[in-house]
Image (spheres, helix red, strand yellow):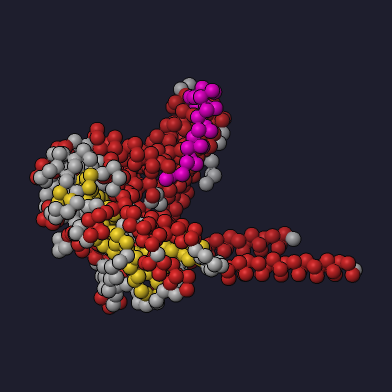
Amino acid sequence: MKRSKMNIAGLLLALLGLMTIPAAAAQAKPTITISGSTSVAPLATLLAQKYVKTCKGGSCPKFKILQGGSDVGISDVSRGRVTIGMSSRDPKPGDPGGIVFNRIAKDAICLVTNPANGVASWDQNLVQSVFSGGVRSWSQVPGAKQKGTIDLFTRTPASGTQDAFDKIFMSPKKVFSGASQKASNGLVQQSVQRDKAGVGYVSLAFTKGLTVGAYKGVPCTLRNAKSGQYGGLRSFYMVTRGAASGASKKWIKWIRSNPAALRIAASEWVPFK
Amino acid sequence: MDQRVELLLGALASSILLLIAGMIIFVLLKGLPSFTHNGLAWFGSGGNIDQQMMDIFNSPADPDSYVYHLRAWPLLYATALITGVAVVASTLFSVLSAIFIVEFAPQNLRRVLEPVVRLLAAVPSVVYGLIGILVVVPWVANHLISESDKESVAYVIQLDGTSILVGILILTVMITPIMIAIIVDALRSVPTNWVQGAAALGVNRWRAMWTVSVRAARPAIVAAAVLATARALGEAIMLSMVAGSVGFAPNPLDGFTFFLEPARPLASTIVDNAEGLSVVPFGQTLYAFASILLISSAFLSFGGWYARRSLSKYTLGAR
């Protein structure tokens, strides 16, 4: 009788001990959950990996990065479902209240065509007439090697890239109603790669295998984006609920000031100044 | 003990019913504002639906000035067209294939065909979508779509390979294996005396199968068609990859070009725009689409049950 009671007591103590270990571990390592823009996600992944490697002390955070689009990030962070939301578009009047947009980098939006077509330069009139459906044939576009009908690839309404494209390149005109709406930068890239008559807009990091055109005489390259000369620049933000605090504040401060972080951002984007 | 088991099983069954009822009520309530602001014109046509959805998405933050204006006809038409043609084609093909497997196939072929059909029924739909977008869509774009076709509709819509033809084709391939499996089981369960009686009267094998077995298995064919339609209605990812990403109602007056035009059914629209759920009126519009899908599935089930009831007067009595 005594032995079984002692066994039970020992088991309970062991269980209690086991339960405190995860609690202690959780206190030691904060988790930063991130969701949002598919354009910001590659940069955020690289920065998180570097931060985990180089941070010192016991409060090094763990990162969980999801995507879903700029609007998903903004709504998730405003409801407290994630710690940080990634956004590739500027704040809109319809956004929920109480959130702060912390800019971490800038990005260029490039106009891309299939290499078999190779349109090398665009001006604002040409972009507007092609994307609004005013011009429907490549034979009317100077510099195009194809002669057939134009196939437009754009983004769904929730995309931050689409928001930036409409504001910077298209306004006040609207995009052609027959354009194919893709859900991410990668899908636009893949569609223009397989269609000789295809044209679309992507973030600078997604231009492999495509011809990138110059806008208003300035080529869409990283150097021109950094110097501010390229006309199609938009900001990347880390959105927090209220001002950033704790582990997220440290990480955002690190992104903006640490030389290693700035070097990572400078590899394909315009780092914070 | 029996009483306890009975109560437990009854509780499980009721909880599933409650879950389904709760789901339907939740989706209907969430989607109601979109219907009340548009009235019956919600189902009509007028204007470009992609532009209307963009306007709903960019509504001001003030609840009094939410934009709800929507004319969902292109999406309803695309859903009905793609699902309807795919199910009709699939039913025809499945019945003929099932007759072949049950009656005419040599033993070795039958031993290979049956497991292969069941294996195909288990392939995830996103695999079909990948094959479609990597193989079928470029083939259609390069070989079936001519430059004159593209020019003839250039100011209305673009033909870039993703089209209802590819959507219907891959959807048919997707739903046929399930139908074949169900109809083969049904044809096998017809009492052999009936078929042997027909043969004794001098009828050839094909006629015996068609007039006796297929007639007897009609309730099962209807059940298989209902199952296939339900799967086709809910097919979102594959159709969003291959049927086109633009809300457009293909025009039958265009002739063959009609099949080369893109469209986007309801389920694909929901999955393509799911990122915008956080914008209140946009989320309510997506819930309105979902409630249409739920209600049509309910009508489908009911219609199938009614058709099987009237058919089973002359058959095995099994439902």
Res B197 seen here = no
Residue B108 painted magenta: yes
Residue that sits furthest to the right in the current view: A1
Residue B194 to residue A175: above or below: above
- Give the farthest residue toward the front: A259
Q: Residue at x 20, y 57 (%)?
A: A230
Our reading of the magenta stretch's main secondary structure is helix
Quadrant occupied by the N terminus of chain A: bottom right
| Residue B115 rendering spot, x and y as whole percentages | 53, 33
Image spot of residue A137 (x, y percent): 13, 44
For the residue pair B85 and A228, the one nearer the viewer reads as A228
A216 left or right of A153 in image: left
At which x and y percent is residue B229? Answer: 40, 47
Where, by quadrant of the figure, is residue A165 drawn?
bottom left
Residue drawn 44% across the image and 27% down it: B207
* Camera-side residue of A223 and B289: A223
The segment highlighted magenta reads: B103-126
- When the figure is inspected, residue B295 is found, relative to residue A198, above or below; the finding is below
Quadrant housing the C terminus of chain A = bottom left
Q: Quadrant of residue A243?
A: bottom left
Which residue is pictured at 29% across the width and 35% down the height? B139
Q: Nearer the viewer, residue A26 or A176?
A: A26
What residue do we see at 35% from left, 70% from top? A102
Q: Position of residue A190 (x, y in %)?
A: 31, 45
Q: Is residue A177 above or below residue B165?
A: below
